[in-house]
Amino acid sequence: MIPLRDQNPAAKTPIVNRLLIVANILVWIYVLTLVRQPSAVAAFYDRYSFDWREFANQIAQGQIALATFAPLITHMFVHGGWLHVIGNMVYLWIFGDNVEDRLGSGPYFIFYSLCGVVAAIGQGLVQPEPMVGASGAIAGVLGAYVVMFPAARVSTLVFLGIFITIVQL
């Protein structure tokens, strides 16, 4: 299922949501400029992904510094492929504007960031492999949307074998 649009227009321009989308796309474009240098791509992912084992080791050694905690945020702007970034940004575009409208820009940014941090820590506890992507933050936004707008209608593209249809959920 791929959401296409909701029938729940935001009253205000979702500045933070749009800036998050632009930042994610710009980081992806930057990664694309590194493709011809595989070592540069690997170094970029090593630096900006969240690695639970490395994080836990640094905390255990008392290394409480910005560099220890920064990957909890930076991993949300790095994606594993073009489908990953496009998929995440479609969901953020459709659902994030309403959540930002309801919460306000500042609280929305804090909420989005906290969802991403909590998701990374939770994922790290279960599967301690390096991770990238905004999926955890966006899952939080989706949860907030469902709670805040339970009656909202969403046009969704549904693949049924070889057939494709649009349904209202």
Image (tube, helix red, strand yellow):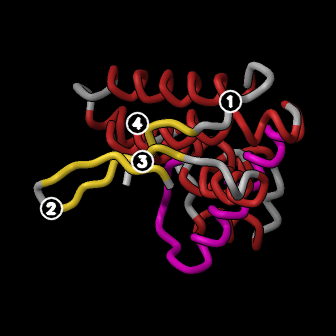
- Considering only vertical position in the picture, is 11 above or below 155? above
**How far across and down, in percent of the image, does residue 117 sit?**
71, 56
- At label 4, counting other C-alpha atoms closer than 10 Å, the crowd grade (few under 14, some 14-19, many 20 or more) is some
Q: State how far apart marks 1 and 2 are (Cα).
A: 32 Å
**At x 56% / y 80%, what residue is drawn?**
126
Badge nearest the viewer, 4 or 1: 1
* Mark 2 or mark 4: whose residue is earlier in sequence: 4
In magenta, the rendered stretch is 108-133
Q: Secondary structure at mark 1?
A: loop
* Mark 3 or mark 4: whose residue is earlier in sequence: 4
- At label 3, counting other C-alpha atoms closer than 10 Å, the crowd grade (few under 14, some 14-19, many 20 or more) is some
Residue indicated by mark 4: 86
Is there any visible trace of residue 80 in the rendered image? no
**At x 52% / y 73%, what residue is drawn?**
128
* Mark 3 or mark 2: whose residue is earlier in sequence: 3
**At x 61% / y 78%, what residue is drawn?**
125
* Mark 3 or mark 1: whose residue is earlier in sequence: 1
Q: State how far apart marks 3 and 2 are (Cα).
A: 16 Å
Asked whether 127 falls inside the magenta stretch, the response is yes
Residue indicated by mark 3: 156
Please state which amino acid type lies under the numbered disc 2.
Answer: Gly
Residue 9, disc: 1
Residue 161, disc: 2
Q: State how far apart marks 3 and 1 are (Cα).
A: 16 Å
**How far across and down, in percent of the image, does residue 85 sit?**
43, 39
User: Which one is nearer the viewer's eye here, 72 or 158?
Assistant: 158
**How far across and down, in percent of the image, does residue 47 sit?**
53, 43
Horizontal side, residue 107 vs residue 128: left or right: right
Please state which amino acid type lies under the numbered disc 3.
Answer: Thr
